[in-house]
Image (spheres, rainbow, N blue to C red):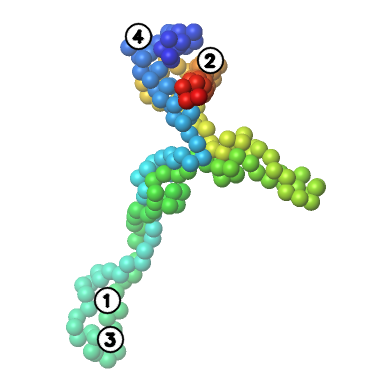
Amino acid sequence: YALSRCDRVAALRKLPAEIKPVVMRIMASYAFEDYARSAASKKQCPCCYGEKFIESIVFTNKVQYPDGKPPVWAKCTKGVYPSYWEEWKKVREVVKVACPECGGKGEVSTACKDCRGRGVAIHREESVKRGMPVIRDCQRCGGRGYERLPSTEAFNAICEVTNQITRASWEKTVKKFYDALVTRFDIEEAWAERQLKKVTR
């Protein structure tokens, strides 16, 4: 579908014949990922990139013995202590710790952080005025209950394949084509539901 419609967009029409199918595949896959998202979906953690751990710099106090470890007699000689041979230093180390963003799971929920996937939130100002809870569509996610996949991710993926689509052309024309691909999935889903209802009547 994307290949049959892409020539309507000048920036996509000018792509070389060997690059165009690759770009269309990238756009279609990102469009499907956006369409298939829900409040229950998971995505790769943006902090640890799915690794579950991040590197952190810590300072620990470590004992060193510059003149060698204390002799055995130091423990039993009055007025002499093994600590005389010790030298404490702060040592800088890089250690792996569980990612604080995902809690070591490697993935995070796509559910909206404001409404937690419900799609609705309390209108605080109206609630105070009326003296009772007033519910409205979540302003952050628009009532969907989840965050949409940023179109910039699709653009960045395309930039790894070709540099012929600039940021300006993406924003002006190509992004509209990308959004149309996402909408196409909704149209096809609605058509499939209608056909299913006809068959199961």
Residue at horizontal 36 percent and vertical 67 percent from the top: 61
What residue is pinned by disc 1? 85
Judge whether 163 appears above or below 130 on screen: above
Q: Amino acid at mark 2?
A: Thr
Amino acid type shown at disc 3: Val
Q: Circle 3: is it few (<14), some (14-19), or many (20+) Cα within 10 Å?
A: few
Picture coordinates of residue 148, whole percent (x, y) = 52, 33
Q: Is residue 147 above or below residue 194?
A: below
Give the alpha-carbon distance from disc 1 to disc 2, as whole Å: 73 Å
Q: CA distance from mark 2 to mark 4?
A: 20 Å
Whichever of callouts 1 and 2 sits on the residue coming sooner in the sequence is: 1
Q: CA distance from mark 4 to mark 3?
A: 84 Å
Residue 4 point in image, percent of width and height: 43, 10
Tell me the distance, in whole angstroms, between the alpha carbons under discs 4 and 1.
74 Å
Mark 4 against mark 1, which lies toward the viewer?
4
Element on which disc 2 rests: helix
Q: Which residue is mark 4?
A: 17
Q: Are marks 2 and 3 in contact (CB under 8 Å)?
A: no
Amino acid at circle 1: Trp
Q: In the rendered image of this protein, does residue 29 appear above or below residue 53?
A: above
Whether residue 17 is visible? yes
Task: Give the distance between the C-alpha atoms of the residues marked 2 and 3, in whole angstroms.
Answer: 82 Å
Label at residue 80: 3
Determine whether label 3 and label 1 are within 8 Å by CB: no
Q: Which is nearer the N-term, disc 3 or disc 1?
A: 3
- Which residue is drawn at the image coordinates 63% and 41% (left, top)? 120
Question: What secondary structure is found at the residue carrying circle 3?
Answer: loop
Q: Position of residue 189 (x, y in %)?
A: 49, 24
Regarding mark 1 in the picture, which secondary structure is present there? Answer: helix
| Mark 2 nearby-residue class (10 Å; few <14, some 14–19, many ≥20) | some
